[in-house]
Amino acid sequence: MRIERVLAPNAGPFTGPGTNTWLLDASGVVVIDPGPIIASHRSAIESAVGDRRVLAVLVTHTHSDHAPLANPLAHHYEVEALGYGPGDEFEPDRLLADGDTVGLGVERLTVIHTPGHALDHLCFLVDRVLFTGDHIIGGSSSMIEDAGAYMASLTRLQGMDLVRLLPGHGPEIDEPGAVIDWYVAHRRQREEEILAAVQSGATTLQEVVEEVYRAVDPALHPLAARSVQAHLEKLVKEGRISSELF
């Protein structure tokens, strides 16, 4: 099994060094997260594939930095684009669900539904290596849309025997257990900080963000606000804060 990374030229405050497009070759190439429609990136993917046979194009989720190139690339190679569901710039030829498998010749890739960062998020497991999309990223934490679902998805990964994580952004992760444990602890700590901010008198989303993320570049506060909102909704659902506040 051979794995290669093609880095998309879409670096930024929300994407880090750019989107990692992964080429998984096990008797044929599967392209994972081809990224945004950028001509130079598409050329780089096609150059990396070379004359090898492409089996399918997979997306972890439908955010605009991961999925838009999937349909054009699948059409070019005359293969299927696979994902959990459609998005603004993605229409899967075949839907994937938790527990599904994709044939890779001598290997099989297993689909794991990991909602939280996005409700349609998938991870892909092959030979104890997990392609994590934005569920876990290299060198940072990830924005979330549903805190309860995200914690459940992280907890599920804690029970898996993994040797490497290949994220949608940032470097490869060679200590999966330690990083997953850190993600769980980080989210629990953030939730307690958010709860403390509310108990100290914060009554708006912006006030909570400014308190909890006061040491973070304000340019990142809009992204942080999405995760804070997810935690607030979880706290309301659990009855730990009043729904009248948020």
Image (cartoon, rainbow, N blue to C red):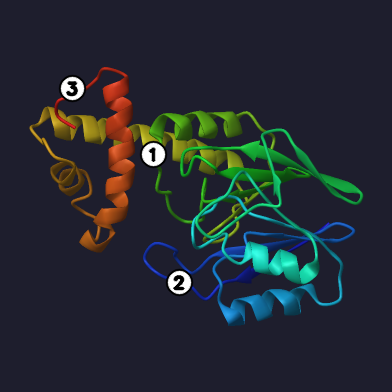
Q: Residue 11 carries which label?
A: 2
For this rendering, which residue is in front, 200 or 112?
112
Sequence order check: which comes first, mark 1 or mark 2?
Answer: 2
Q: How crowded is mark 1: few (under 14 residues within 10 Å), some or many (20 or more)?
A: few
* Residue farthest toward the left in the current orientation of the protein: 201
Residue 166 x/y as whole percent: 63, 54
Query: On the image, numbered disc 1 is attached to which residue?
Result: 186
- Residue 212 placement: quadrant: top left
Residue drawn where x is 54% and y is 65% of the image: 19
Q: Position of residue 118 (x, y in %)?
A: 48, 44
Q: Where, by quadrant of the figure, is residue 242 drawn? A: top left
Q: Nearest to the eye among marks 1 and 2: give it.
A: 2
Q: Quadrant of the C terminus?
A: top left
For the residue marked with disc 3, what is the amino acid? Ser
Mark 2 lies on a secondary structure that is loop
Circle 1: residue type: His
Label 3 Cα neighbours within 10 Å, binned few <14 / some 14-19 / many ≥20: few
